[in-house]
Amino acid sequence: MRNTILVLSALIPVFAFAFRWQPSCADPVPYPEGFRSWVYVKTGLIGPKSKFFDQFGGFHHIYANAEALTGYKNGKFPVGSVLVFDKHEMLEDSSGNISEGKRKWIDVMVKDDRADSTGGWSFEEFKGDSRTERSVKELGAVKCFNCHAARKANDFVFSELKE
């Protein structure tokens, strides 16, 4: 009996380690620490003449982790790919000079195959510079995916890597 207890005691940490990284839909998308040191993909600017300016106006910087580079190269993003959409206000002075303003939000896409209904991607949005204040709930993730569904042929990703 004592040997059985010792064996089971020894196996508990092994099982805990083996299963602790198993994703569940209840797990939130983590804040992408250090994303500005990842691969810079591109920057877009939605200006005042765009019909999307009120909602999306400003600078859009996109970063990708190492895993996501495979997806940009072959069109299929592997599990572990993370894309960050860093959104900043657009400031224009009286001379017409445009500069980047404060951060409005950070959108994060994580390829984890947790959700078949969203192409294997999980979505999150962090408000401003906060690492904890989130905007996307389950319904929001569906709304994110509904927009991304138009890019199914590109594994639901809008951006393309500029080399």
Image: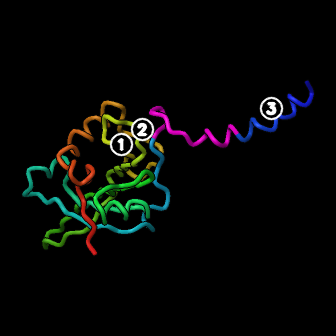
Which label sits in the foreground, 1 or 3? Answer: 3
Task: Specify the quadrant that holds the N terminus.
Answer: top right
Amino acid residing under circle 3: Leu
The residue that label 3 is drawn on is 8
Gap between marks 1 and 2, in whole Å? 6 Å
- What residue is shown at x 32% (from left), y 52% (from top)? 104
Decide: few, some or many residues near mark 1? Use Cα within 10 Å; few <14, some 14-19, many ≥20. some
Secondary element under disc 1, as helix, strand or loop, is loop
Please give the range of residues in magenta: 15-28
User: Mark 2 or 3, which is nearer the eye?
Assistant: 3
- Residue drawn at point x = 44 percent, y = 33 percent: 25
N-term-proximal mark, 1 vs 3? 3
Magenta region includes residue 16: yes
Is residue 162 left or right of 136 when viewed as pictured? left
10 Å crowding of disc 2: few (<14), some (14-19), many (20+): some
Asked whether the residues under the numbered discs 1 and 2 touch, taking CB atoms below 8 Å apart as contact, a structural biologist would say yes
Label 2 sits on what residue type?
Arg
